[in-house]
Image (tube, rainbow, N blue to C red):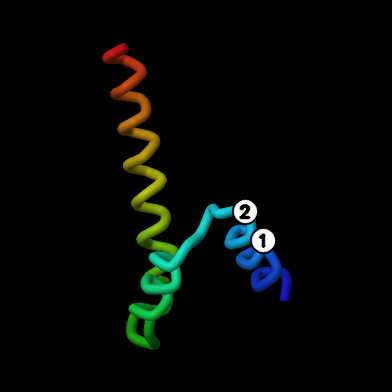
Amino acid sequence: MQLVAMKQSFFDQGLLDEQFIQLEELQDDVNPDFVEEIVTLYYRDLLRLISSLEQAL
């Protein structure tokens, strides 16, 4: 229940959009952690890219 409320809150704030729904649709019983893995990779790469930008500036 809390997860559903938090997800809706993220949609309301504009932090999630249609692309997140598309990711969820790719998740299945074979790979139940698909969305978590993709989001984790995204943030890991994002932190690395921000660090590179900071060094370049």
In the image, what residue occupies the spot 42% across and 75% down?
24
Left or right: residue 13 versus residue 31 is: right
Q: Which mark is residue 9?
A: 1
- Residue labelled with disc 2: 13
Q: Determine whether the residue tagged by mark 2 lies in a helix, strand or loop.
A: loop
* 52 w.r.t. 20: above or below: above
Residue 22: image location, x then y, percent? 37, 73
The answer to which of 30 and 12 lies nearer the viewer is 12
The answer to which of 16 and 27 lies nearer the viewer is 16
Crowdedness of circle 2 by 10 Å Cα count: few (<14), some, many (20+)?
few
Amino acid type, mark 1 = Ser
Amino acid type, mark 2 = Gln
Q: Determine whether the residue tagged by mark 1 lies in a helix, strand or loop.
A: helix
Image quadrant for the C terminus? top left
Residue 28: image location, x then y, percent? 38, 85
Give the image quarter of residue 33.
Answer: bottom left
The answer to which of 17 and 31 lies nearer the viewer is 17
Name of the residue lying farthest toward the bottom: 29
In the image, what residue occupies the spot 36% across and 25% down?
51
Residue 54: image location, x then y, percent? 36, 18
Name of the residue lying farthest toward the top: 57
Give the image quarter of residue 39.
Answer: bottom left
Image quadrant for the N terminus? bottom right
Crowdedness of circle 1 by 10 Å Cα count: few (<14), some, many (20+)?
few
Q: Which mark is residue 47?
A: none
Q: Are marks 2 and 1 in contact (CB under 8 Å)?
A: yes
* 34 w.r.t. 11: above or below: below
